[in-house]
Image (cartoon, helix red, strand yellow):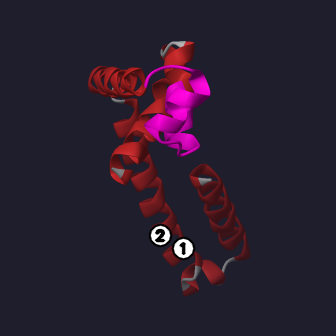
């Protein structure tokens, strides 16, 4: 269930603005504030079944957006590439060749810092 919440939360980060206000309220309470369906139903004055149905519908909608647009998959892949790049730059950063030339060392350090910022 936690993996499902995380997945819905991640997809919501990318596609949440495409949902209705009511759907957004329910997802935010469920995924971000960790409310139960019962707590959400009390908070929003709707039935528990309505919350359950909405979450099922939202999950389907978000997965459909991802299937068509693939933004989360592209983001995840890009993040993996940047992590790999950071590891390579870290290796280069500590190499004797780079350390022997201050100009190169400064450039490599700048690349390292920028790469870290991309991951933030």
Magenta stretch: residue 41 in it?
yes
| Residue at which label 1 appears | 90
Q: State the residue in front, 91 or 51.
A: 51
Q: Is residue 24 above or below residue 34?
A: above
Across and down, in percent, residue 108 comes to: 62, 66
Instruction: Name the mark on residue 50.
Output: none
Q: Is residue 85 above or below residue 23?
A: below
Q: Residue at x 38, y 27 (%)?
A: 55
Magenta stretch prevailing secondary structure: helix
Q: State the residue in front, 69 or 17.
A: 17
Badges 2 and 1: C-beta atoms under 8 Å apart? Answer: yes
| Residue at which label 2 appears | 87
Magenta stretch: residue 83 in it?
no
Q: Does dot 2 land on a helix, a strand or a loop?
A: helix
Q: State the residue in front, 12 or 86.
A: 12
Q: Does dot 1 land on a helix, a strand or a loop?
A: helix
Residue 104 occupies which quadrant of the picture?
A: bottom right
| Horizontal side, residue 3 vs residue 120: left or right | left
Across and down, in percent, residue 98 comes to: 60, 77
Count of number-bearing discs:
2
* Mark 2 surroundings within 10 Å by alpha-carbon count, few (fewer than 14), some (14 through 19), many (20 or more): some
Outermost residue to the bottom: 96
Q: CA distance from mark 2 to mark 1?
A: 5 Å
Q: State the residue in front, 18 or 79.
A: 18
| Horizontal side, residue 87 vs residue 97: left or right | left
Across and down, in percent, residue 95 comes to: 54, 83
Q: Residue at x 38, y 52 (%)?
A: 2
Q: Which residues are magenta?
A: 26-47
């Amino acid at each position: 269930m936690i993996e499902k919440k995380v997945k819905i939360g991640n997809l919501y980060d990318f596609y949440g603005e495409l949902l209705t206000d009511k759907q957004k309220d329910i997802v935010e309470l469920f995924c971000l504030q960790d409310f139960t369906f019962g707590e959400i139903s009390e908070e929003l004055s709707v039935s528990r079944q309505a919350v359950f149905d909405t979450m099922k519908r939202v999950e389907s909608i978000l997965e459909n957006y991802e299937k068509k647009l693939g933004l989360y998959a592209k983001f995840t892949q890009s993040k993996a590439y940047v992590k790999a790049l950071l590891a390579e730059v870290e290796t280069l950063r500590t190499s004797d060749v780079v350390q022997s030339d201050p100009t190169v060392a400064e450039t490599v350090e700048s690349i390292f810092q920028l790469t870290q910022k991309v991951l933030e």
